[in-house]
Image (cartoon, helix red, strand yellow):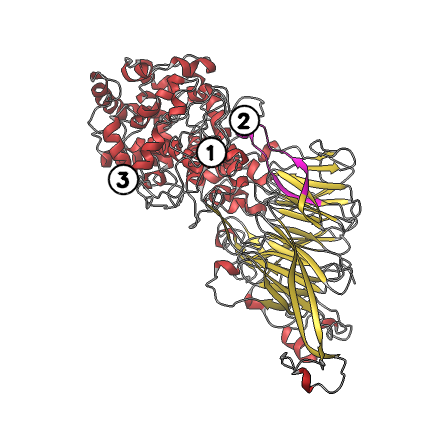
Amino acid sequence: MFGKGAKRKLDEEDDEGLEGQALASPVAPGAAGGPGPRWPEGPSKVSYTLQRQTIFNISLMKLMYSHRSPPAEPRLERRVLINNMLRRIQEELKQEGALRPPLLLLPPSPPPDDPMDETFREAPPAAGSGPGPASPGPPPAMPASPVTPASAAQLPQQLLALPPSPAPPPTPPPPPHTATPTCPPATPTGPAPMEACLTPASLLEDNDTAFCTLAPPTLPLSPPPTPPNCQPASPLPLPPRGPSPHGAGFFPPAPASLAPGPPAAIAKTAAAANTTTTSPTAPALPLPSPPLPLRDSRTTAPRAEVAVVSPSSIGVAADAAPASHPYPPAPPSPSGFLSDLALDDILFADIDTSMYDFDACTTAGAVTAKLSPAVTADDLLKSLTSPYAVAPAPQVSANQPFKIDLTELDHIMEVLVGS
Amino acid sequence: MAGGGSEDMQWCFSQVKGAIDDDVAEADIISTVEFNHSGELLATGDRGGRVVIFQQEVENKSVPEYRSEYNVYSTFQSHEPEFDYLKSLEIEEKINKIRWLPQKNASQFLLSTNDKTIKLWKISERDKRPEGYNLKEEDGRYINPGNVTSLRVPVFRPMDLMVEASPRRVFSNAHTYHINSISVNSDHETYLSADDLRVNLWNLEINDRSFNIVDIKPANMEDLTEIITAAEFHPNHCHTLVYSSSKGSIRLCDMRASALCDQHTKLFEEPEDPSNRSFFSEIISSISDVKFSHSGRYLMTRDYLTVKIWDLNMENRPIETYQVHEYLRNKMCSLYENDCLFDKFECCWNGNDSVVMTGSYNNFFRMFDRAQRRDATLEASREHNLPLQLLKPRRVCTGGGGGCSKRKKDEISVDSLDFNKKILHTAWHPNDNIIAVATINNLYIFQDKVSDPDSADDLSASDMMCTI
């Protein structure tokens, strides 16, 4: 090796198949613009999707999980880089998913306020500039971020849970450091902080009211947490993080194990997202399950499932998810997306069968997707009918948890992935 | 003898400092290493907020084989952990950087910094003390004035050398974000400190005021996508500084242009190689260290996989790129997962800018000889600790078992690398071929092999010991 630094040939026979694929597959240009994504054909596309999803989940986990025992300020560079990674993946999904039903994307960014931010103690910014109560108080966790309606439109993945944060539609997801330590970092566990994080009043008053009001139900929309032992085999050696010691469900409000501040908000949406990602194991997926039982399940749901993310299941879920998405097709215009969504629409809209049209959803041709409909459609219908039969809004989600046989699903998953 | 490069440089073990046991206390993890301007002193900082200074043994300086013997000179607690009550967050006492000031008098001065506070320390020697006080006993008690019958003038008598470190200035409350760099200006009056979003200029004499010269904080923090990772003053031009970013760009600023240097004078950025694009392109392009050459003509940057040398007169691409551990390119997903992809490796120049050095994993470190176009991989390990034992070049082979000759001891496969053993901090003596390499909790000192015309080059280590 001399000054020019000759590159080595890519080792395609890498033991970690996904590693090699990462290089083999082109990455769709993100915000920088450029040509659209070139989809590799066949199996490499699947692995590309799998890897992308894996990286997405890893990134979310990184933002949520802090190793520091006495909480120290999270490293800004790390958070910015992870956040950029998440944004890039979101952008890519957005570009890919023009045909896909409007799945709301989880913006991995925390609210604009942040212990690291100098304006931490200042009054909240004007509405529209993002939610972001600077006051350390209740409304924490709603990540200010923004789910760009456009990006929301595509999310194929499991990220069916709406990020509980409103935001002006076109705003890109804010970087983590803008997050507030929404839920007070010191509080270790608990339903109390969780509840406090759930419905930040300031968010509800925000521009995107419709989006904001979705906040509570979004939680229910996440599939019930799968027990950790149900995780399918994961091709990548994911870190066995194990259940959060604090037992927070979807909204781990900055327990000691979490980095205070920014990760908290991210954690919420991340947790929601992650739970949805693990939904593949529970094929029924993100349905408007009852907020109440879900809340309970949240509290009890170990955050382990966040770590339970299985690339294979994710990949399949990615394609299966759209089918199960109960949301009506969003209007194509990004700015109109959020405002058009109303709680009622989401909860009571008739299921548009186009969402079950896996051919449309999986134009990229994920092989496994073709099989998944057969598996999930029935389950989907089962779970879909009940919530929609119930009238009132907040209680909409049926009290029935998914009656999916997880072991059966695991088996199917392994068959799909193994083939 | 400064720098090398005429023949193949060979390196010998000299010393290792630090605990032997594998159970490493977090506080003992070395976080910075820096020679002073003469090379006589070597300072290390650790996560426990302590600074340990080693001094080159004077008696041995003339003996080439032992000129790299360093012994502990001074140890002091520089920073203590603090708690930010406002944000309920701890401020770590870890020493992020140490920079020596050029020596002006008998005392030595250095700047040490943690995430938030910079301190100026004076290290002074005391080897004499006054004795023979007229009014005091030797132990300090005052003599009854009535008993004083003669006049005595105290005289200074030699005593055992005592090295004292005292904080002369504390520069605090100027950084909201984590300080990653400090750099003393060539005017010897000012210095800069850089955090993730800002660069501040200080006067060494004034600790309650600093000037902000670079601020990349966006109006809306949600738009933040790039941060400052390192900054340094030019070694000769007191108006020039550079700072690197997490997106792989380096900006050179001239303070004469304006008070606030948000507009860069030069932007050094290499276009991305599209064939190497991956999810991790941005992360591995983040620059972890930036160092001017001693001449001031070149700039060296370290990102995750490479070391790049830039000519200050050419902004569009580096003049040299060295692959540090290209074999890790296929492992990036795992490295991302276990956070290794965020490791911040430093790099350093030798005295005459002909060789550059940086660290890697498995306690390997790499040297690139720019003139000879050679590179070497060496290991800092306790297995090769015989005095003056030659370090054998190591090699990392890729591809499972293929390509790795199992019988060669100096070859190791990528999958066997220990990613917990990382060498992030290295330093090169400014005037000599002596290097300090920090593993997690040990400091290794190596020197180049002294070629003895009377001895054959293939003497084994034990033979060398016998002849010396």
Amino acid marked by disc 3: Cys
- Image quadrant holding the C terminus of chain B, namely bottom right
Percent from the top left, x then y, of residue B334?
47, 44
Secondary structure of residue under mark 3? helix
The foreground one among B210 and A312 is B210
User: How many tags in the picture?
Assistant: 3
Q: Is residue B163 left or right of residue A33?
A: right
Q: Is residue B456 left or right of residue A367?
A: right
Circles 1 and 3 on the same subunit? yes
Percent from the top left, x then y, of residue B270?
67, 35
Cα–Cα gap, marks 2 and 3? 34 Å
Q: Earlier in the sequence, mark 1 or mark 2?
A: 2
Q: Which residues are magenta?
A: B210-232
Asked if residue B412 lies in the magenta stretch, the reply is no
Secondary structure of residue under mark 2? loop
Cα–Cα gap, marks 1 and 3? 32 Å
Question: Is residue A283 in sight in this rendering?
Answer: yes
Q: Which mark is residue B79?
A: none
Q: Earlier in the sequence, mark 1 or mark 3?
A: 1
- Residue position marked by numbered label 2 in the rendering: A30
Is label 1 or label 2 in front?
1
